[in-house]
Image: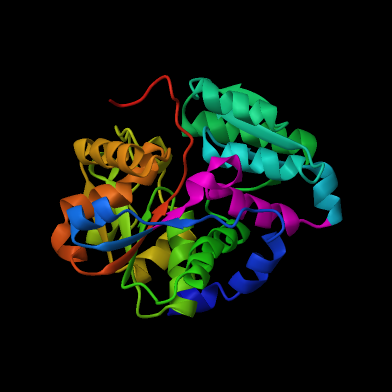
Amino acid sequence: MENISLHESVRIEEAYARIGNEVKKTPLLTSSTIDKLTNTRIFFKCENFQKAGAFKYRGATNAILKLDKTDSVRGVCTHSSGNHAQALALAAQNHNIDAYIVMPENAPLVKINAVKEYGGKITFCKPTLEAREKTLFHIQKETGATFIHPYNNIDVIEGQATCFYETLIQLEDKPDIVVCPVGGGGLLSGTILAAKQYSSPTRVIAAEPLMANDAWQSLRVQQLVPSIDPQTIADGLKTSLGSLTWPIIQENVFTILTASEDSIIRAMFLVWERMKIVIEPSAAVPLAVILEHPQVFSKKSVVVIFSGGNVDLKNLPW
C-alpha cells in the first residue's frame, strides 16, 4: 500500500518496547451475555484502564520519549478539550517536561481538573478551532514548545498502533475483525498499520456516531469531508480526520459503520450493567455498531477497542 510505505517510519515493535515501562498492559475481557446477544465472540481491549483513562497515553508517551533534549527543555504544547490533554500532561509530568495545554472555556470540569492534577499549564480560549489554533500559536511562539498534535502526528499514530499490537500478543488466534472508534483517526490509523503488519487477514472496521459521520461521508465520496458542528454524546469523536490519518484510512479500512445516539447509550449501559466497568460514550460506539449491524459480525471473532473511560459521573446519559 502506497501510504503504508509513506509511513515506513512507523516502527510498532520499537514503539512498544520504548513505552513498555510507561504504559499499562491493558486486559482483554469477554462477556458471555454480550456474546449471546450478538451471536459473536467479542474480546474487549480495555484501554479505559490505561493511565490517564484512555489509549491516548500510548501516543503521547511515545511522542514525549522521541523528543530530543533541546526540545524537552522547551516543553510540549497542544490544544485539546479531552483525553489527549490529560495524556500529554501526564506523560510530560513523568519526564519533568512542561506541558502547555490550550483548552476551550467550556471544557468539562472533570477534564480541566485532571489536566491541572497532571501538572499541565492551561490557557483557556473560545470554543472554536480558530481560537484554539491562534492561542496555541502564541504560546508556541513565546515558549518554543513542540506541538504534539492529538492525532495528526506520526509518533502519536505509532504509539496508538501498540494497542492492537498488544492485543494480538494477548490473543491465541488472529481475530476476524477489529472494530475501532474513529474521530481524528489516530487510533484507527495505528490499528490499520498494526493489522497490516501483524494480522493481515483481520478486517479493520471503523465505528462512528451517525450524528458525527464525517469519516463515513469521506469514504463514500473518496475525499476528506470536515466535521461541522457534530451533535453527539460521543464527545471524543467530534474531530475531523487529519492529513496523515485520512490517506491511511481511505486506502485500508474495510468499511465504516455508524450508530445512532440511542444505540450508543444502550451499548454504554449494557457494558456498565453487565461487565461492571466504566466506559465513556466514545468507547461504546464500536459495540453500538455491532448491535446495529449484527449481520456483519455474526459468528465472527471480534476485537472491540474500548478507547477510554473518562466520563463525568454526575452527568450520565441515563
Give the quadrant of residue 44: bottom left
- The image shows residue 299, relative to residue 74, as above or below, that is below
Of residue 162 and residue 215, the one placed in the foreground of this image is 162
Residue 30 rendering spot, x and y as whole percentages: 36, 56
Residue located 20% across and 69% down the image: 299
Magenta stretch, main secondary structure, is: helix
- The answer, for residue 115, to whether it is visible in the render is yes
Residue 166 rendering spot, x and y as whole percentages: 54, 66
- Viewport quadrant of the N terminus: bottom left
Magenta segment boundaries in residue numbering: 44-68
- The image shows residue 116, relative to residue 275, as above or below, that is above
Give the quadrant of residue 228: top left
Residue located 56% across and 23% down the image: 125
Side of 172 relative to 302 (left or right): right
| Residue 66 lies within the magenta run | yes
- The image shows residue 238, relative to residue 301, as above or below, that is above
Side of 221 relative to 131 (left or right): left
Q: Which color mode does the image show? A: rainbow
Q: In the displayed image of the protein, which residue is found farthest to the left?
A: 295
- The answer, for residue 121, to whether it is visible in the render is no
Of residue 83 and residue 150, the one placed in the foreground of this image is 83
| Residue 162 lies within the magenta run | no
Residue located 62% across and 53% down the image: 24
Side of 20 relative to 208 (left or right): right
Q: Count the numbered circles shown.
A: 0
- Viewport quadrant of the C terminus: top left
